[in-house]
Image (cartoon, rainbow, N blue to C red):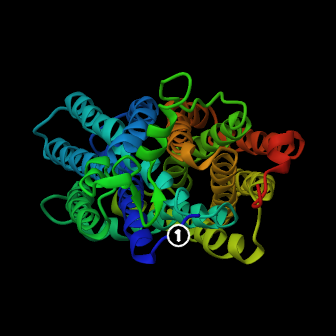
Amino acid sequence: MPQKLPNAHFVVVFAALLVTAAGNTALQSVLPVIGREIQIPDMAIAVIFSLSALFWTFSAPYWARQSDKRGRRRLMQLGVTGFGVSMLLCATVILLGIKGVLAPLVTFALFTLARGLFGIFGSAANPAAQAYVAGRTLPAERTASLAILASAFGLGTILGPAIAPIFILPYVDLSGPMFAFALIALAVVIWLQLGLPDDSPEQALKGGGAEATMPSIGGMPTGATAMAAEETTSTGRRERMQVTDPRIKPFMIFGFAAGSLQAATGQAIGFFIMDRVGNTGLHATQLISIAFMAGAGATLLAQWGIIRLLNLSPSQLMRWGSLLGAAGVAGIAFAPDFHALVLAFAVASAGFGFARPGFTAGSSLAVSRHEQGGVAGAVTAVNGACFILAPAVGIGLYELKPELPYWLSALGLLALAVYAWTNPLLRKSAVET
């Protein structure tokens, strides 16, 4: 029986995801302005995120397996370190591009490579964090716990755009926020080292005795323990959780579709605001930040308040999240002014704020405790896959007609609501699974 996860440990894990979410959203809020200042095409900005997401998708399952073998804390540290190094390199490249030292094409190429490092190494933190929390909570508590963990993304999308303008300083200019988050990432890596116990198999072996072969933290077996147990099966091989596993496949389909629609509409929102309001430069960055903060606030209200207050099950989160998201993205398409656009974006964000923990918790509850590392890797890979093509598709549709990605996303979310209501596995997914 798992012991209660100490609040101090949860806060550290939460911080590991928060810093990457905040940094990425800060980058997303300034990159459209940076692109137009140094004359990088809008579609090229989408390609940068797509390539990073491609690396993320393929590396996440590998890092999930490594967290089973090497411990969750080490992989969270690796992920945050990868994020910090990527941010430092991105900031340096952008600074040189803004100063005219690098040509736009060279800036684009080097920035793409630096961002790719995040896709390769940054993906280590998410599956390790999810498996850490899921492995230390009872099934009845897991939906709420994973919803709070997922809210690190929502809180990050408030903090990132909110503090990004603070670091747009005289010399570093628009690269300032990236330098700042590289330093913050270093602080979080140190916090992980000091704030979480070492859950690696090597540390457990130092204890000797029976615990040497069954390493645990606070009486709970780690992912390494589970993997050792799996090796004693008749196959004698470690099993890798596949996104096509019939127990989780419907959740993966839902998560990929919902995440892709969110990525497509979110990627276009900065350009939508600049073109709709007719502003560029710092003022445009501030307006984009306001929209992101409003969306993040709505996400946090959903994940910190409504989910816990109403004790919503994964199936309910997926159904109502799809409908709410559809209403929000449709509202963006028809918004007559900036204020209406921000309100609609907040509604859409609340919908996605329901849907994301819905499919995450549902897939976690669908498998056994020793498979949490594997399912966390599958979830992280799917979340990354959403950003491979969707940003470019969103920008492509936007260039055809600005409202087009939002109209199509509304239809897609309505179809997802029907899928969540009709698929047997999604329909029965509940807290007590």
- Left or right: residue 154 versus residue 336 is left
Quadrant occupied by the C terminus: bottom right
x, y percent for residue 256: 63, 37
x, y percent for residue 263: 56, 43
Which residue is more in the foreground, 408 or 319? 319
Which residue is pictured at 54% across the width and 50% down the height?
269
Q: Residue furthest right?
A: 422
Which residue is pictured at 68% across the width and 51% down the height?
365
How many marks are shown on the rendered structure?
A: 1
1 in relation to 261, above or below = below
Q: Mark 1 sits on what residue?
A: 3
- Left or right: residue 181 versus residue 382 is left
Which residue is pictured at 63% across the width and 46% down the height?
368
Q: Amino acid at mark 1?
A: Gln
Which residue is more in the foreground, 23 or 63? 63
> Is any part of residue 419 visible from this angle?
no
Quadrant occupied by the N terminus: bottom right
Which residue is more in the foreground, 235 or 168? 235
- Left or right: residue 199 versus residue 190 is right
Which residue is pictured at 34% across the width and 62% down the height?
282
Q: Dot 1 surroundings within 10 Å: few (below 14), some, or many (20 or more)?
A: few
Where disc 1 sits, the SS reads loop
- Left or right: residue 141 versus residue 52 is right
x, y percent for residue 133: 50, 60
> Is any part of residue 285 visible from this angle?
yes
Q: Residue furthest top?
A: 235
Q: Quadrant of residue 64?
A: top left
Q: Quadrant of residue 11?
A: bottom left
Which residue is more in the foreground, 314 or 160? 314
x, y percent for residue 302: 66, 69
